[in-house]
């Protein structure tokens, strides 16, 4: 199969890792199905919107300001950056105003055009909430055995 025969947009949309495409000034261009399922949103709600208007930064404990994120670092450095594990609660799409605990990691990858400038930023998101839940359950079981 030749590259010309592959629909790369279909691959992006169906990829099992949540992905979002942004402009260099953080306007949302596209999101794949996994990203949308993770955040409980529809593509129409996000396209053309600023990323931080839709997904506000979490406050940073130490200085009270917004936490510097992998996305911020990637825009500034022009290099691939990743976040450590972080809790980012998302609003339940079926219960407005109710937020559900999520644990995620992200990777932000600037993609440069032929002129060397950042054309697109790919933000990958992994929701590892099920892993955290499993760990907590194992910890509860271990604690019960000690009692």
Image: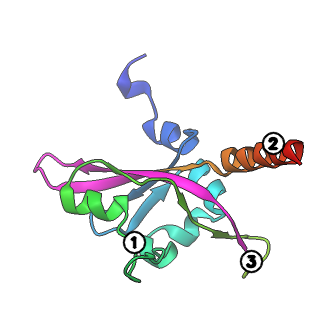
Looking at marks 3 and 2 on the same chain, the residue that comes earlier in the sequence is marked by 3
Which element carries disc 3, helix, strand or loop? loop
**Direction top: furthest residue:** 1
Residue 112 falls left or right of residue 40: left
Q: Nearer the viewer, mark 3 or mark 2?
A: 2
Res 142 label: 2
| Mark 2 Cα shell of 10 Å, populated few (<14), some (14-19), many (≥20) | few
Taking the magenta stretch, the answer to whether it contains residue 121 is yes
* Residue plotted at (66% across, 55% down): 37
Expressed as whole percent of the image width and height from the top left, the position of residue 143 reads 82, 48
**What residue would you read off at disc 3?**
98
Chain-order first, disc 3 or disc 1 = 1
Residue 17 belongs to the span the image colors magenta: no
The image's colour scheme reads rainbow
Q: Residue at x 10, y 50 (%)?
A: 115
Predominant SS of the magenta segment: strand
Can you tell which mark lies on residue 67?
A: 1
Check disc 1 and report its element: helix, strand or loop.
loop
Residue beneath the point at 80% across and 47% down: 137
Q: In terms of depth relative to the viewer, which is nearer, 13 or 131?
A: 131
Q: CA distance from mark 3 to mark 1?
A: 23 Å
For marks 2 and 1, give the CA distance. Answer: 34 Å
94 on left or right of 91? right
Measuring from the top left, give residue 109's x and y in whole percent. 32, 49
For residue 84, side relative to residue 96 (left or right): left
Of 141 and 19, nearer the camera is: 141
Residue at point 46%, 34% (across, down): 7
Asked if disc 3 and disc 1 are in contact, CB closer than 8 Å, the reply is no
Residue at the far front: name it.
Answer: 147
Please provide percent x and percent y for residue 101: 68, 64
């Amino acid at each position: 199969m030749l590259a010309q025969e592959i629909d790369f947009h279909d691959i992006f949309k169906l990829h099992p890792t949540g992905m979002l495409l942004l402009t260099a000034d953080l306007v949302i261009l596209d999101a794949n199905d996994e990203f949308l399922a993770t955040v409980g949103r529809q593509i129409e709600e996000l396209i053309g919107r600023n990323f931080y208007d839709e997904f506000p930064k979490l406050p940073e404990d130490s200085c009270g300001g917004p936490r510097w994120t992998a996305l911020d670092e990637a825009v500034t450095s022009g290099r691939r950056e990743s976040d450590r594990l972080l809790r980012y609660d998302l609003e339940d799409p079926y219960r407005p105003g109710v937020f559900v605990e999520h644990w995620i990691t992200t990777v932000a990858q600037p993609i440069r055009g032929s002129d060397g400038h950042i054309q697109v930023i790919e933000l990958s998101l992994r929701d590892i909430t099920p892993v955290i839940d499993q760990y907590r359950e194992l910890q509860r079981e271990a604690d019960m055995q000690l009692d």
